[in-house]
Image (cartoon, grey):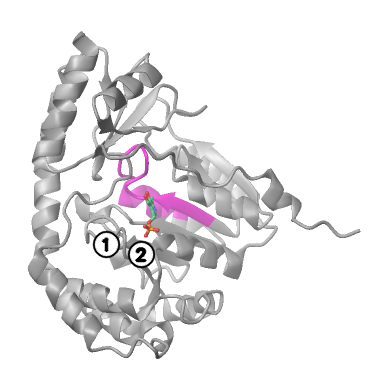
Amino acid sequence: MSPLIRKEVKKLHGYTLASYGNQTKLNQNESAYDLPLAIKKKALARLEALAWNRYPTPFCAPLCQKIADYEDCDKEAVLVSGGSNILIQAILLASSIEGKVLTVTPSFSLYDIEAALLGNRLISVPLEKEDFAFPKEKFLARLKKEKPNVVFLANPNAPTGNLFSEEDLVAVLKAAKGLVVVDEAYYPFSDFTLKSRLKQFPNLILTRTFSKAFSLGGVRLGYLLADPSIVREVQKAMLPFSVGLLSQAVGEVVLEEEGFVRSIVNEVSREREIVYQGLRQFKELKVYPSHANFLLFQTKKAKALFQKLLGQGVLIRDVSGPQLPNSLRVSIGSPSENRRFLEAISHALTA
Ligand SMILES: Cc1ncc(COP(=O)(O)O)c(C=O)c1O
């Protein structure tokens, strides 16, 4: 008798996120800055003029062109999706079913979930214990031994916030026989991208999102940059018309107003330093430097601290796990949200 549900699916816990109602919300690395009303109005005017009864242009051709202009690359090197999550799935569908996927741990949980869903064997190399540095020798050894179909590396990494060096990533690209996906969801906050290496390495895919620096978490848009021969193949694994014309139009408008994005990134970098220094005042916390829009810190009583903050209306994320004991992650919010968080943590630790 054939099973109703595949064993790979049954084994998964699936993605969950508890909801805690209205809080100072610093748990999802969203942008704290909604689009200014003038930009929303421009997008709404664009939406009003569209024919909502018609299917959108296949594979978002106009938005692809705008992204290509913004990235200074050919539009054939761009693939748009409804969030970069979808790209992770499409890349796996195109390259690795019941194959091998190599990543590091701790990292973004979706690589594991999607790889497992498609029956892949997931190989995770632990990051260095002290500072989450890239374990270059161990990683390269596993890469050469296992010959994975795909490598996933987030840079900056999540939830640790640190950046892997260009030298290490190039070493991976040189040694890999399969695809190397570098997830640059947080790159605008780090000032580092591997984009200049795309022409040199046709097995390199960069994934990007509109959910963080572009303030469009609720709109759902992402894209990848890769060699056009890879883009054409991954595109076949994406459902046609899966990005609605409303999302596409909003994405186009935001790219036309990208000055807004730069001002957010500058503010987040300033605020990240303030929160980092603020947290470092507490000797019971170990705070890690970050190149993203969040900070990771560890403390012996992480669960209790999370609850105490929640009791004061401040929601952060408990990211503790076997590879990451007693760990909390806080997104960088607006200046007033960050002050609220620092006050709340001071109260929780001293009360
Ligand atoms: C490393 C990383 N990649 C991708 C994503 C998902 O991005 P999107 O909203 O575009 O699906 C996240 C979201 O938090 C992330 O942390």
Q: Quadrant of the C terminus?
A: top left
Magenta segment: does it hold 154?
A: yes
What is the residue that sits farthest to the front in this orientation?
A: 21
In the image, is 111 to the left or to the right of 171?
right
Q: Which mark is residue 220?
A: 2
Q: Which residue type carries mark 1?
A: Leu
| Residue behind mark 1 | 216
Displayed-image quarter of ligand 1: bottom left
Q: Which residue type carries mark 2?
A: Arg
Q: Quadrant of the N terminus?
A: bottom right
Give neighbour class at mark 1: few <14, some 14-19, many 20+ (Cα, 10 Å). Answer: many
In the image, is 73 to the left or to the right of 181?
left
Give neighbour class at mark 2: few <14, some 14-19, many 20+ (Cα, 10 Å). Answer: many
Magenta segment: does it hold 101?
A: no
Q: Nearer the viewer, residue 88 or 133?
A: 88
Q: What segment carries the magenta color?
A: 151-172
Answer whether labels 1 and 2 touch (C-beta < 8 Å). Answer: yes
